[in-house]
Image: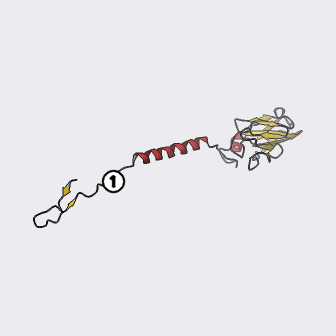
Amino acid sequence: MTAYRDPQPTSGDVMTSTTPPAAPASGPTRRQVLVAGGAVAATAALAACAPARSDDGAAGSPAASAAGTIVKTADVPEGGGTILRDVQVVVTQPSKGTYKAFTAVCTHEGCLVAKVADGAIDCPCHGAQFSISDGSVLGGPAPAPLSAVPLSVSSDGSTITLS
């Protein structure tokens, strides 16, 4: 240990104490750096895996990006439907000449629905099923129905335009 002199000299200038304890090193410890780095990596991984969600028709949502999309009515089978993956919308025909459209993004985990058959819109991720008539939940873990997307049918009945 290194000795130091008391700043107030005494008679005979005698050493009175030892060096005070060293101040902690500045900056983070290796453990703190590793923990922080792990937390950042975990957050980034979770954010990358999280589905994009927006069912409210706002700009950037499936409903907004689908506006103006045209589908031939002949491409939408009665009692079934057609999934428009590029605009994330499913168009259905619950009964002859009646057409409906919904967001194709499942309300459970944000997966894109994969199949329309037997009166149901099916999500492949966790088995959620939605009605082709109104988008309501028929089964599975989905907490809410699919959002409706407005559409219009041409006067001659040959095309559907999403609005």
Is residue 95 depicted above or below 143 in this figure?
A: above
Residue that mark 1 sits on: 24
87 vs 3, left or right, is right
In this rendered view, identify the residue nearer to me: 107 or 93.
107
Which class describes the residues within 10 Å of circle 1: few (<14), some (14-19), or many (20+)? Answer: few
SS for dot 1: loop
Q: Position of residue 102 (x, y in %)?
A: 76, 43
Furthest residue toward bottom: 11
Q: Residue at x 51, y 46 (%)?
A: 39
**Res. 153 visible in picture:** no
**Res. 120 visible in picture:** yes
Q: Residue at x 69, y 35 (%)?
A: 86
> Which color scheme is applied?
secondary structure
Q: Residue at x 76, y 48 (%)?
A: 145
In this rendered view, identify the residue nearer to me: 102 or 157.
102
Q: Image quadrant of residue 158?
A: top right
33 vs 14, left or right, is right
In this rendered view, identify the residue nearer to me: 110 or 28.
28
Q: Amino acid at mark 1?
A: Pro
**Which quarter of the image is occupied by the C terminus?**
top right
Q: Image quadrant of residue 162?
A: top right
Furthest residue toward top: 74
Q: Position of residue 108 (x, y in %)?
A: 71, 46
In this rendered view, identify the residue nearer to me: 75 or 114.
114
Furthest residue toward left: 12
Number of callouts = 1
Q: Position of residue 126 (x, y in %)?
A: 73, 41
